[in-house]
Image: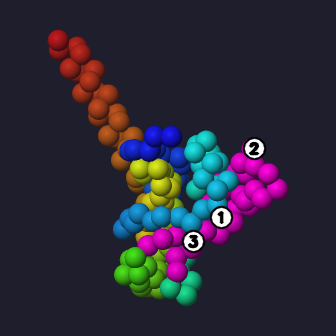
Amino acid sequence: MAKEEGLKVVATNRRARHDYTIEDTYEAGMVLHGTEVKALREGRASLVDGYAYVDRGEMWIDNVYIPEYFQGTWNNHLPRRKRKLLLHKEQIRRIAAKTREGGYTVVPLRLYFLDGRAKLEIGVAKGKREYDKRQALRERQDRREADRAMAARKYVGE
């Protein structure tokens, strides 16, 4: 089989960018079982309820849903098990220091294959308040309306 090249996105957590202000992002490898990799290659996963934390100098991700592999046998994986993330020690220290400050959490943003290896993009994030969310939505709507108006104006002028 030919070696896989490039980037293939399996799952994104769009809700995280709505609920949190992302301050730093990191790319982490994941320790996976064989059937998890096969299920991911089918493009099925969900990051919505996932969160990451540091435990005894190691980074872990919990509550990320990777469904059971349909053609797996009795040694299939658990869909929502906790998985170890592979990061450099200095990166883990930086993340741990930030989360100890308070108000910060680590959320998964994107799960993808990079040159055949499963990677997870995680972000150190601070929760948005309700009015911040409304303001972001309003800005997006205003920008969309302005783009539409400019496009309509350009079309009429020609």
Compared to residue 73, the image places residue 53 above or below, namely below
Return the residue at label 3: 84
Return the residue at label 2: 71
Image x and y of residue 151, in percent = 26, 24
User: Which residue is painted at 64% across and 56% down in the image?
Assistant: 34
Compared to residue 141, the image places residue 152 above or below, namely above
Amino acid bearing label 3: Lys
User: Which residue is painted at 75% across and 44% down in the image?
Assistant: 71
User: Which residue is painted at 82% across and 56% down in the image?
Assistant: 74
The residue stretch that appears in magenta: 58-87
Please name the predominant secondary structure of the magenta segment in the image: loop
Q: Is residue 75 magenta?
A: yes
Element carrying mark 2: loop
On residue 152, which mark appears? none
Return the residue at label 1: 63
Choose the circle earlier in sequence order: 2 or 1.
1
User: Which residue is painted at 69% across and 66% down in the image?
Assistant: 81
Nearer-the-camera pick, 93 or 78: 78
| CA distance for labels 1 and 3 | 12 Å
Residue most toward the left? 158
Residue 146, image quadrant: top left
